Image: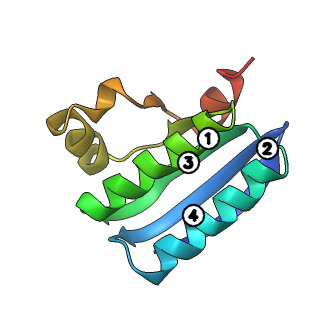
Amino acid sequence: MKFSSSLKDGVLVFTLKGKIMGGPESTEFHDELKKAVNSGQRKLVMDLGDVEWMNSSGLGLLISALTTARNSGGEMKLARATDKITSLLVITKLNSVFDSHPNVQAAAASFK
């Protein structure tokens, strides 16, 4: 998994790429997310458009990110979830937990 982050209209967007399966990259991602939240960033979007595959550890990563955001008084949205990721969220019933949007712009606009 690779990730990058950028600030767009006051919303921190994490762009995730590749296969999300846990491991050192997940720890690095969560450390970066915690740093952002601790510095006052409360609006987060996870751009999943370039995620090829995700296992249960990947789902755990998203749940952990959502929990971190909410525990700090913030919120996290999903954007551009692929059909595979959307199916995984539906099967696990996590589609009712995550606020998912067709693109980053719609996800960012939903905070207002």
User: Do tag 1 and tag 2 residues touch (Cβ < 8 Å)?
Assistant: no
Distance of label 1 from label 4 (alpha carbons): 11 Å
Image: 32 above or below 45: below
Left/right placement of residue 9 relative to residue 91 reads: right
Tell me which amino acid carries mark 4: His
Q: Which mark is residue 78?
A: none
Tell me which amino acid carries mark 1: Ala
Image: 109 above or below 21: above
Q: Residue furthest left?
A: 91
Distance of label 3 from label 1 (alpha carbons): 12 Å
Q: Residue furthest front?
A: 71
Q: Quadrant of the N terminus?
A: bottom left
Q: Residues within 10 Å of mark 2 (few under 14, many from 20)?
A: many
Q: Quadrant of the C terminus?
A: top right
Instruction: Assign a secondary structure to mark 2.
Output: loop
Distance of label 1 from label 2 (alpha carbons): 9 Å
Q: Earlier in the sequence, mark 3 or mark 1?
A: 3
Tell me which amino acid carries mark 3: Met
- Image coords of residue 46 (percent x, y): 55, 48
Distance of label 4 from label 2 (alpha carbons): 14 Å
Q: Earlier in the sequence, mark 1 or mark 4?
A: 4
Distance of label 3 from label 2 (alpha carbons): 14 Å
Which residue is label 3 attached to? 46
Q: Earlier in the sequence, mark 4 or mark 2?
A: 4
Residue closest to the eye, 42 or 78? 42
Tell me which amino acid carries mark 2: Gln
Which image quadrant is residue 15 in?
Answer: bottom right
- Image coords of residue 98 (percent x, y): 42, 31
Which residue is label 1 attached to? 69
User: Do tag 3 and tag 2 residues touch (Cβ < 8 Å)?
Assistant: no
Which residue is label 4 attached to? 30
